[in-house]
Image (spheres, rainbow, N blue to C red):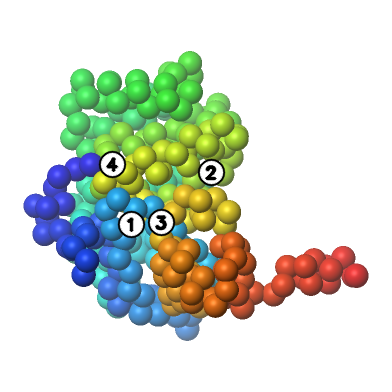
Amino acid sequence: MTDGAAEAGDRSGADGRRVVARLVGVERRFGEVHALRGVDLDVFAGEVFGLLGPNGAGKTTAVRILTGLLAPTEGRAEVAGIDVAAQPLEARRHFAFVPDGAPLYSQLSATQHLALVGRLHGLDEAEIATRTARLLEGFELADRADDPIGGFSRGMRQKAAIACALIAEPDLLVLDEPLTGLDAPSTAIVKELLRAWARRGGAVIYTSHLLDVVEKVCDRMAIVTDGRVLAIGGMAELRARAGHDGSLEQLFGALTEADDPALRAAAILGD
């Protein structure tokens, strides 16, 4: 992890833990559509944080604001204590974002992608070479290291994108549906990787519709609906909020007042 966070005026939460990412009173409107409504959120060093919600809830908007791809209408987003809108280049030194279907340069190889990202983050060539070799071997891409990524399968492209996020060892990883396209062994590796990243003191924001995976991987979760944070916490806090024990999928349904999936399936089939 980088140590520039402390230099940038890093924040601490009420319990003394280091805040790596923060949304403060974030509002976002698109014309008449109110996509986010006063969202407050802290993500701490050493945790995997799940950002959940039904389609259209505001998750993607929140992630785009946090990563500087979209400006808030009101409020602010911070990474490592840096205002993302006011100092976007400085903030980007401290996080890596892997969107769903991450765009990569089809004519470049995995080795060239990693070298490009490493140089943009100021790594020296020896360190880039060392980290590149480790990442490509770990993701089982070493035998295709110099092939253009345009010829990769979707799963291979996803692994290359995650490797690019890791090479600079940022304070924060922001991953949108990171398991898309991965086979079972690669999925297991990435899930363990996220936990290991948090144990090393990094932070992860993880958005996914695979609630069973989120339940196993994430320390805390925020459930967003209609642009608001409806509930936040670990499984114990979410169960207390929902008023019953159950899986994350069951709690999610109860808290968002989603239709019973069995009844919806029966309606679709005409039963």
Q: Nearer the viewer, residue 237 or 18?
A: 237
Q: Which numbered disc covers residue 67?
A: 1
Q: Nearer the viewer, residue 248 or 177?
A: 248
Q: Please tell me whether mark 3 or mark 1 is closer to you in this view.
A: 3
Which sits earlier in the primary sequence, circle 1 or circle 2?
1
Q: Residue at label 2?
A: 179
Vertical side of 124 occupied by 103: above or below: below
Which sits earlier in the primary sequence, circle 4 or circle 3?
4
Evaluate if marks 4 and 3 touch, with contact meaning CB atoms under 8 Å apart: no
Q: What type is the residue that disc 1 sits on?
A: Thr
**Where does residue 266 sit, x and y in percent of width and height?**
84, 68
Q: For label 4, count other residues whose C-alpha is less than 10 Å away and answer few (under 14), some (14-19) or many (20+).
A: few
The residues tagged by marks 4 and 2 sit, at their Cα atoms, a distance apart of 21 Å
The residues tagged by marks 1 and 2 sit, at their Cα atoms, a distance apart of 20 Å
Q: Residue at label 4?
A: 200
Q: What type is the residue that disc 2 sits on?
A: Leu
Q: Nearer the viewer, residue 262 or 163?
A: 262
Q: Residue at label 3?
A: 219
Which sits earlier in the primary sequence, circle 2 or circle 3?
2
